[in-house]
Image (cartoon, grey):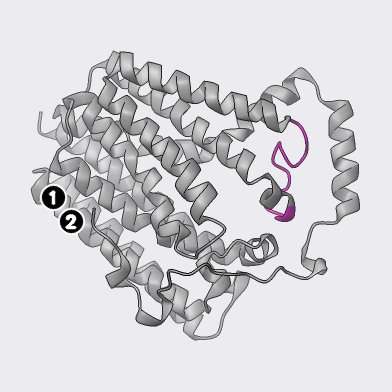
Amino acid sequence: MVTAPFLISKDTVSNQTTHVTTAPASHRPDSVEIKVEQKQNRTRLSTRDVVGAYVALTKPRIIELLLVTTLPVMFLASHGVPKLGLAVATMLGGLFAAASANVFNCVIDVDIDEKMRRTRRRPLPRHQVPRRGAFIYGIALGIIATIILGLGANWLSAGLALVANLFYVFVYSMLLKRRTWQNTIWGGIAGCFPPLIGWTAVTGRVGWEPLVLFLIVFWWTPPHTWALSFRYREDYKAAGVPMLPVVREAPEVAVQILVYTVATVATSLVLWPVAHTGWIYGVVAVLAGAVFIVEAVQLLRRANAGLRDVVLKSMRLFHWSNTYLSLLFLAIAVDPLIHL
């Protein structure tokens, strides 16, 4: 596994726990408001509300992004269109696996979610779902995912999905998230597994191509997450979560974002010769990567100019990072179809 410390400036690297000062009461959600909302939720929940709450626990938007990096890889591994049954089983198994990990994350982070304005309306802070029920739900989803992937694809893919789930829960959510600003770097490894799962579902083995794709997502995750953390820095500060924008100044964070963005784009170009992709992938990787780097450079300029919070416009890079990854993996799927 390629490691990242050599990309980080000397004065930012620390293996020690990072402590974050809790934000003043003025930045926290109003406790009376929360208690009134919780009381109302306990008495007004319909069956539809309960079902919606359990769906919300799985964080569907995150699942969508994970599946975007699974199916296109199956096209690449198949050198064309993958078998329909295999594709359905892999996507369905991946959906349940990601849902399981997200549910466990909600259970573990319920105290954090209660303090953050962005997350306090999630089902557990609002007491729409009992914590024990959510825990059992997460286990059930994980078991279903393993069975679907094992029987519908192969047990290597099922095992990789299980490893990703356990890594996200125990390494990121329980060990890293509250202790170090490097939580995003190493915890993001869990989100790098979908390309491996998509590839092994088709081929039954791990190759260089999915490893390069793994690294693309690995480098991509920090700038994507730190850009969002800029926007919700006060939220993370109030919850005591040491995201990089909370514990470092904006220009320093922007430099790190630029470094990881360049690494992402450079690695995406490595896939071109390794996977023998054609001109479609190459053009998309170059053009989309160039825009990604330009956005990172502009963010750094705004940070150096003293802009902070909303006027820093970090969400521009966040939204483009989503678009970039989607375009890149769409090109991965389309490219082998052109060469059929």
Q: Which residue is mark 2?
A: 269
Q: Residue 84: percent from the left, percent from the top?
A: 28, 16
Query: What is the distance, in whole Å, between disc 1 and disc 2 at their CAs?
Result: 5 Å
Q: Residue at x 33, y 65 (%)?
A: 260
Q: Residue 107: percent from the left, percent from the top?
A: 63, 38
Whether residue 117 appears in magenta in the rendering, the answer is yes
| Badge 1: residue crowd in 10 Å (few <14, some 14–19, many ≥20) | some
Q: Amino acid at mark 2?
A: Leu
Q: Residue at x 21, y 41 (%)?
A: 210
Q: Which quarter of the rendered picture does the C terminus lie within?
A: top left
State the extent of the magenta-drawn residues as a range: 115-129
Label 1 close to label 2 by CB (< 8 Å): yes
Q: Is residue 89 visible?
A: yes
**In this rendering, position of residue 85 left or right of residue 47:** left
Q: Which residue is mark 1?
A: 272
Q: Is residue 80 visible?
A: no
Whether residue 91 appears in magenta in the rendering, the answer is no
**In this rendering, position of residue 180 left or right of residue 155:** right
